[in-house]
Image (tube, helix red, strand yellow):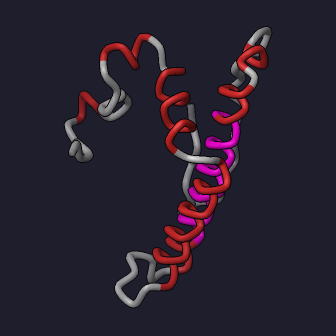
Amino acid sequence: MRTSNHHPQWHNQPLRLTEEERKNPLLVLKDFFECYHLNDVRDINWNWLVEVLSSSGSISSEAIERNNHIFFYEKLEALIEACYLIIKAPELLKNLELATPAIAVPAGQIICTL
């Protein structure tokens, strides 16, 4: 099993993808949704969030930490749903552009950048 790696040269590099998957990331999406139904992913993701926010040994004792976990949960769920649509209807990718809008975030909160 692979774990996270904190080597500075790898901060924005895929660590878990094979060479084949790096060349064709859609393979990863296809494999994921062959293993899990969209509703199963929502259930698992929700259970993780509940556990993180409510367990006695939670890593989220501060309000800002709990807020950041909820924000991450929402972004992860949207990402998963977008991936699901790409697998189910790959023609959606045609003529799409990736825009990077400016995001204003209050101090101390997660900043989302591409």
Q: Residue drawn 57% across and 56% down?
A: 72
Q: Is residue 20 left or right of residue 85?
A: left
Q: Quadrant of the N terminus?
A: top left
Q: Please check the rendered image and state whether residue 81 is part of the magenta-colored stretch, yes or no.
A: yes
The image quarter in which residue 23 lies: top left
Q: Is residue 49 left or right of residue 99?
A: left
Q: Quadrant of the C terminus?
A: top right
x and y, in percent, of residue 40 in the image? 60, 56
Looking at this view, is 114 or 45 the one in front? Answer: 45
Looking at this view, is 104 or 87 the one in front? Answer: 87
Looking at this view, is 75 or 101 the one in front? Answer: 75
The image quarter in which residue 91 lies: top right
Q: Is residue 6 left or right of residue 111?
A: left
Q: Residue drawn 36% across and 28% down?
A: 14
x and y, in percent, of residue 35 in the image? 50, 42
Q: Residue drawn 59% across and 59% down?
A: 73
- Residue reaching furthest bottom? 56
Q: Please check the rendered image and state whether residue 8 is part of the magenta-colored stretch, yes or no.
A: no
Main SS class of the magenta portion in the image: helix
The image quarter in which residue 103 lies: top right
x and y, in percent, of residue 81 in the image? 69, 42
Q: Is residue 47 above or below residue 44?
A: below
Picture mark count: 0
Q: What range of the chain is rendered magenta?
A: 67-83
